Image (tube, rainbow, N blue to C red):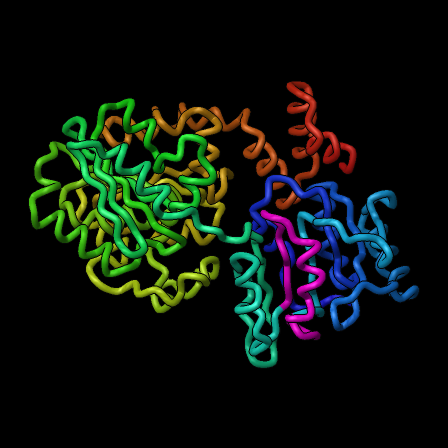
Amino acid sequence: MMSEGFDFKSVLPALDADDVRTVADINGQAPELCILLYQRYGCSIDMVSCDRKGQAKQPDTAQLQAWQARLEQGGVDRDAIRVAEPSQDLGSYDVILALNSFGARHKIQNAKPMLDRALQPLSRLVIEIRKGSGSYPFLKAYGSCNTLVPPEAGRNGLAILSAEPQEVLPPSGEWSKVARQLAGREGFFDELEEHSFLFIPRGGTLVVTFDNLDIAMTKRDDRRPWGFSFIEAQDWSMLGVMANGWTWFRHQEVSAKFEALRDSGFFAQFSRVVFYGASMGGYAAAAYAAAAPGSTVFAISPQSTLDKTLVPWEMRYKKVWDRDFSGPFGDASLASQAAGDVHIMFDPYVAPDAAHAARFSGANVTFWRCPLLGHRLGSSLQQMGVLQEIARGAISGELTPHRFHRLLRKRHEFPRFQRELTNLALDRGHPRLAKQACEYILRQRDDRFFRRMKARL
């Protein structure tokens, strides 16, 4: 019934999902993964039956009964097991499982009718992929793929698609208008082909930030670059570098601009220069710090490079594999050695993030580990109310391990950390500890996740 040879336990952390309420198992090919998802999230699970053309059909009776029996045997409550009727409109799901199906056994293009209905922004598709099936180019239209097991000749691979809203970039003219107003008469705004540079002069500290235009213009009410309000509140000058897409700032125009700023003495006029960013922006902060030797880098969950010859284990960002990561700003782990201090903040339980962090081996590097807060730990720290204090301390050179761990203790009351901690207890075979954690949290507040986990335990 199910595909063999995959370690499905590796799927759960790779989903990077705070909560999963609905799961679709295409043709009932992934009962073991359904059981793991139910054990962790208490989700409802639908069998969705499709023919090889992607059209809804009635499930095979014997196959359905075997699938239901296996789920119940694995501890899934009977009320959580459902069958999607072909006559009904297919709703959207948090997680869709497509094993031994489209991309492996059937043409990937035939999955379109089902995916168009079942995927929603932030959905996850766990899919088995046959080498040469054309799955990756097809899936690129729906989001980004994280390959857990690369497909090879004679052996299928396993990947997770993170569905993204259809990319509709805001008009660059809209950002230009906002940016020119922010720059005023004393600053500048330079608009390039894929990127732009906004300079706002204030005090003697310059903070260089890196952001994505789509996020700034559509996900933030103030339509301001990453860290804008925080930097403004400190009266620091700001150089905001904006990417018009997921470019990882890998374009000759960006390198040339930083070299021109360096050669003109732009950075030399400031008493302190700081490069600040998260994920893609964290990579750029560490990489382009080489343009201002002696500067400070504060990078959250950064990639060190996406050059496949250097990081063959990095499977999350296929959309940027065609970018050139050579040159003096290409490998951030090397380029950042020109900085005075490099602060790398990451979750050691996110394996690729930990592997990237390990490549930063310079004597100027300080690691700040944030266990169980995930790749998007910048957002987690911001929700906890401690990101600005940590950033301020790192930038000023006053962040000590004692102060950092005191601030990080606030994660003990943070829902994501609590969920990951109880899941870790389960993964390591300590259900009693997980149940005690559920009971403790439920004494503090009512929480659906921990209520359902306690009931299952």
Question: What residue lies at 49% left-to-right and 46% top-to-bottom?
Answer: 349
Q: Is residue 383 magenta?
A: no
Query: Between residues 457 and 389, which one lies in front from this camera angle?
Result: 389
Question: Seen from this angle, which residue lies furthest right?
Answer: 61
Question: What residue lies at 75% left-to-right and 61% top-to-bottom?
Answer: 26
Q: Is residue 336 visible?
A: yes
Q: Is residue 36 left or right of residue 17?
A: right
Task: Answer with the quarter of the image where residue 153 lies.
Answer: bottom right
Query: Between residues 405 and 285, which one lies in front from this camera angle?
Result: 285
Q: Quadrant of the C terminus?
A: top right
Q: Is residue 424 visible?
A: no
Question: What residue lies at 34% left-to-right and 64% top-to-bottom?
Answer: 323
The stretch in magenta equals 103-128
Residue 194 drawn at (x, y percent): 32, 55
Residue 30 against residue 170 in the figure, above or below: below
Q: Quadrant of the N terminus?
A: bottom right
Residue 78 against residue 51 in the figure, above or below: above
Q: Is residue 326 left or right of residue 55?
A: left
